[in-house]
Structures are given as structure tokens and as C-alpha cells.
């Protein structure tokens, strides 16, 4: 039995490499600061999830040049596909987790659009939500994250003045 089967991951996503929810020695595709943020998140929320997959490719990527052979076309696609930092599974719902030192416009866009790309890439109907794990969030964007239904997990909480300014 595979890890995906053990955790009850939706069938369409069983080709991904799934890990038991919790801290790992490293997370594929994440730099040191992002890995520290992921460790921080797991230290507080591990009981909420069953499994996680990292560096999840979504979309088709850019078209390869016409002259590329089959192997190069495959590599080209893989290197140009967009990637979700972490995909979390709680037994019922998938959560797209973007991990950034500062949650700015890039994080907002990724967290907003990646669920749709995930659903289109893997043909899933399972509910998908989004969160951003960060050290700080741009105060001008707090309301936009909230309005879009994107959860924000901040390791270094905003000051009261920044929260007030964002409301």
C-alpha cells in the first residue's frame, strides 16, 4: 500500500510523492528560510493534516521549441511548469500552501490561482483552499487575502499599527 492510499488521498493525486504530515529534514523545492517557515507551521498545525506533498507541478508549462526531441520536450515542460510549495491533505479537503518570507502580491496571486490550476491539471473535484505561511504580510494586502478566503499564517505577527492601517 502506498502512502497516498494509506492517507486516503484523492485517486487523481496518487502519483505525487506524499509524506506523513509533519516536519521533514528538508522540503523539495524550498530554500532555507522557507523550510524554517514550514517547520514552524508544522510545529503548530501537524494535528490538522494527514499528509503533504511538496513542489507540486501544475499547469502545462511553456511549449518546447519545435526542434526539441522527446526527452528535451519532457524536461522543458517540467522545468517551466508552475509549482505549489506544499499541498496538504486533511482527509476531506486539499490545501494549497504557499511559503514566502513576505506575503506580497506574488503570494496572493499564487494562493488565489493555484487551486484552479491544481484542479485542471489533475482533474479533481475535491474542495481546495489556500493558505500562505510567512514571516510577515504586506499590510496593504491583508484585506485582499481575507476577501479572497486565503488563510494567512504569520510567524512574526504584524504590529497593531500595521493591522489597523490594513483594516
Image (cartoon, rainbow, N blue to C red):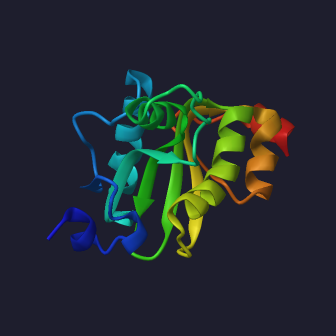
> Quick one: 74 or 144, which is closer to the camera?
74
Left or right relative to 159: residue 64: left
Residue 131 in view, yes or no: yes
Q: Is residue 11 above or below residue 148?
A: below
Q: How many marks?
A: 0
> Is 63 positioned to the left or the right of 52 in the image?
right
At x 62% / y 51%, what residue is drawn? 114
Seen from the viewer's position, the closer of residues 108 and 135 is: 108
Residue 163 in percent (x, y) is at 76, 39
The x and y percentages for residue 86 are 44, 47
Say which of 7 and 83 sits in front.
Answer: 83
- Residue at image position (42%, 69%) is 12
User: Where's residue 103, x and y in %?
Assistant: 65, 34
Examine the image and state in which quarter residue 13 appears.
Answer: bottom left
Position of the N terminus by quadrant: bottom left
* Residue 159 visible in the displayed image: no
* Residue 62 or residue 101, whichever sits in front: 62
Residue in the image at 37% along x and 63% along y: 49
- On screen, residue 59 versus residue 57, left or right, reads right
Q: Position of residue 139 (x, y in %)?
A: 77, 34
Amino acid at each position: 500500500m502506498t502512502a497516498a492510499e494509506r492517507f486516503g488521498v484523492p485517486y487523481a493525486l496518487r502519483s505525487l510523492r506524499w509524506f506523513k504530515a509533519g516536519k521533514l529534514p528538508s522540503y523539495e523545492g524550498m530554500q532555507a528560510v522557507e523550510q524554517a517557515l514550514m517547520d514552524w507551521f508544522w510545529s503548530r498545525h501537524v494535528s490538522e493534516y494527514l499528509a503533504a506533498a511538496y513542489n507540486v507541478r501544475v499547469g502545462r508549462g511553456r511549449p518546447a521549441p519545435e526542434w526539441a526531441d522527446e526527452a528535451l520536450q519532457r524536461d522543458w515542460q517540467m522545468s517551466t511548469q508552475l509549482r505549489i510549495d506544499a499541498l496538504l491533505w486533511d482527509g476531506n479537503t486539499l490545501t494549497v500552501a504557499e511559503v514566502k518570507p513576505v506575503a506580497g502580491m506574488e503570494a496572493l496571486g499564487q494562493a488565489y490561482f493555484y487551486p484552479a490550476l491544481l484542479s485542471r491539471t489533475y482533474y479533481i473535484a475535491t474542495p481546495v483552499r489556500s493558505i500562505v505561511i510567512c514571516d510577515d504580510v504586506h499590510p496593504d494586502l491583508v484585506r485582499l487575502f481575507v476577501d479572497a478566503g486565503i488563510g494567512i499564517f504569520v510567524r512574526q505577527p504584524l504590529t497593531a499599527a500595521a493591522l489597523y492601517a490594513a483594516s
